Amino acid sequence: MVAAKRVFSDKGLSKATMEDIAKEAELSPGTLYLYFKNKDELFSSLSLRILQYLNIRLDHIVNSEKEMRPRNRITALKEAMYDVYEFDPVMLINMFHLQSSETLKNLSPELLDSIKALSRSSIQTTARLFEAGIADGEFIDEHPIALAGIVWAIFSGVVLWEESKRIINNEKNYVKQTLEVAFEIFGRGIRKKPEAGPKSKSAGGVS
Amino acid sequence: MVAAKRVFSDKGLSKATMEDIAKEAELSPGTLYLYFKNKDELFSSLSLRILQYLNIRLDHIVNSEKEMRPRNRITALKEAMYDVYEFDPVMLINMFHLQSSETLKNLSPELLDSIKALSRSSIQTTARLFEAGIADGEFIDEHPIALAGIVWAIFSGVVLWEESKRIINNEKNYVKQTLEVAFEIFGRGIRKKPEAGPKSKSAGGVS
Amino acid sequence: MVAAKRVFSDKGLSKATMEDIAKEAELSPGTLYLYFKNKDELFSSLSLRILQYLNIRLDHIVNSEKEMRPRNRITALKEAMYDVYEFDPVMLINMFHLQSSETLKNLSPELLDSIKALSRSSIQTTARLFEAGIADGEFIDEHPIALAGIVWAIFSGVVLWEESKRIINNEKNYVKQTLEVAFEIFGRGIRKKPEAGPKSKSAGGVS
Amino acid sequence: MVAAKRVFSDKGLSKATMEDIAKEAELSPGTLYLYFKNKDELFSSLSLRILQYLNIRLDHIVNSEKEMRPRNRITALKEAMYDVYEFDPVMLINMFHLQSSETLKNLSPELLDSIKALSRSSIQTTARLFEAGIADGEFIDEHPIALAGIVWAIFSGVVLWEESKRIINNEKNYVKQTLEVAFEIFGRGIRKKPEAGPKSKSAGGVS
DNA sequence: TATGAATGAGGCTTCATTCAT
DNA sequence: AATGAATGAAGCCTCATTCAT
């Protein structure tokens, strides 16, 4: 249920009860079990939607913009990631939690396979962006899968880190700016002939 | 209890029960409550230990190695972080989860303050490394706090991301290699006059 | 539904759900309630069918084989009972359970009356077999209703007992052989001038 | 809990709830789980007690009364069985249900093993009574294990059958008389040189 | 006559926490 | 300071039953 996502977003996986969700969806608890085998599976289905949206965005970049210059490739990647983040920040955070947690072991094999497939696919699609850049001679001759992994790590790291600062220090949400800077640095770091120096000082908000 | 950390490491925050912990510590459940107000506080105390260890390592870098060249500063940072990771991988992962979760709201004010203080301190110590590099004219003229945040985001991102791949795809643990490459890229990205290109192709293991 | 009996046979009364039954019958759950007031009544209706079949078999013995010698009367009885068992072993076992359980109190009065009537009828028909034997002077001068009760007790006892051994010890199903021996002993026990001793050693399989 | 047995006796396995039991025992639901892993195990533990009592009675017969005449052996057996029945009729009935039901599959391996062992032991002890009779030349030369199985089948059959009549027809409880007659017939049936005919007409109450 | 989505009461079980000793 | 038996609230989930179509 699209609406039941709100409950997970508000309370997190373990604090949200099936009754909360049922109430929010204006259904009875039993009805939820017509559509989802159990709580974990309901939760994971929502995560799946994000992964799916993510893959769509990535595919779009790779397919429609082949002529892009490397610098723009990184920018496009950053923008796709940020859009995914904005699409549903809390579920994305929950998904990042899910991925590195024991909850995965309760899932039905089919659901787990879907998650695996989508994860792998998103990495590979990302890697293809780097492959192109390497082929152009613009990116350093690094293993593109490794670069894809790192860019993903940076994405999830920034998102979770800013979330953490938001909760602990009541800070504003600086995900956008932090991503901006992080990707600029990363882009410079993998370009073969980087420009002399950056002019932007866009990271003002980040503390 | 130092030894009860094993239980959280094995089972994760929500799956570990107070009785598990008491048994491992050869105490009774009731006794735990003499030392810790509740489960969350016990867990957070352990997280606190990691944060403390982390700060010690960072302080050591800043204090004892002032003459370091920027390239080595990054290397030292990377090594400190990897040591912290190796000190207790699972607790570190749990701590990263904790930081962006609702559990924080259950903590006693004092404990929460300690966590806040240590988090801020580790960021600031890290920032000082970058300040020195900027003063030397070796690092780009970026906001050092922002750089510290990003380097932390990369660290947590890499750790969680590799953990995720380990669980989902049964992959080996490539944290060390991935950190290596990520920091190399990051280092190149923030140096003012970077060398022409990298020679290392150290990312072989990352897939 | 005749076919839905399979579900009770497979899963037993409490494990079988109305949805299981509906699916097996290619009907919807709601439809079942057009024909049966509730689950217990559906189950009992099936038990009724066995009781009916049983009565038919017994009537047949009494009516068509009046000239039988006592020894053969017992044999005919044994065979009728074994046929009923083979007709649907699991439903018979379930019926034996039903008869001594609280489920009976949920039944509609009409259904309960049917069960009572059939139970009584089968006892009386059985008793008539013994009456004839007593009249012939071949069976001991015992209360025929009592003998009928005992023969029924032996039947149900053997069936449940063998089922128990089958489940607990993974033994083969020795109902036939055990019935054989039990009835032979019983027959000898109630004959007025029993033969010297048995020759058969047919109980080989029973352990 | 000795007292919680009342609830099972009143309501039967599936209708009795853990809360009922806890209330009867003046405990909280959670406390029950300190002593029993789950509902089935609690139930089975009670059944176990009956099986244990049964074995004690049987052992006593075999050990202390070696000089018994065969006719008395059967009588002693009948009396032991009736005592066990009287010790706790409803639990005995429940145990007979348990033995031929799927509930067995939920039990812990240890408990299941205990049940298996006790079941086997009671059969073997019973068989030894028959062995002695056969050795004396008083009982027919039948497989003693088979005879033991049959005597057990008769016991459980009579108990369940009378229970059934009690519930269905509101009859009095004639277990004692029915057992009496059934064992007399059985005894006559397996004796090598049976007396001419019985004198007792003790089955008056059985209908 | 048939459907099948929806219900919601109620069962089993867990586990953080307490308190008399 | 330590115990550990007991608690009881609360969660997840099942499934007999209903009712609008």
Image (cartoon, coloured by chain):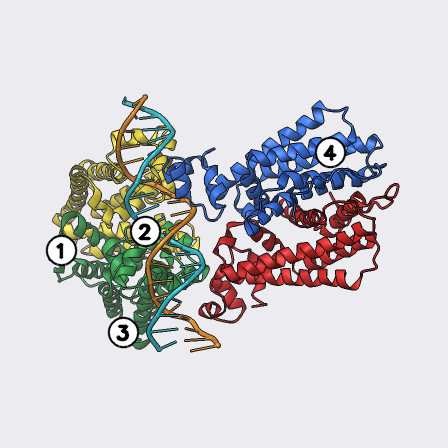
Chain colours: A blue, B red, C yellow, D green, E cyan, F orange
Check disc 2 and give the amino acid type.
Leu
Look at mark 1 in the image and give the residue it sits on.
D172
Circle 4 is placed at which residue position?
A: A74
> Type of residue at label 3?
Met
Q: Name the one closer to the observer, A77 or A149.
A: A77
Image position, residue C129 (x, y; %): 17, 45
Q: How far apart are marks 4 and 2 (CA)?
A: 74 Å
The answer to whether tags 4 and 3 share a subunit is no
Mark pair 4, 1: CA separation: 89 Å
Q: Is residue D205 left or right of residue A41?
A: left
**Coordinates of residue A179 in the picture (x, y in percent):** 67, 40
The residue at the point 71 percent across, 51 percent down is B175
Q: Do the residues at discs 1 and 3 belong to one chain?
A: yes
Q: Residue at x 30, y 56 (%)?
A: D19
Eye-nearest disc, 1 or 3: 1
Is label 4 or label 2 in front?
4
Mark 2 neighbour class, 10 Å CA radius: few under 14, some 14 to 19, many 20 or more: many
Q: Mark 2 points at which residue?
A: C160
The residue to which callout 3 is attached is D68
- Marks 4 and 3: which is nearer the front? 4
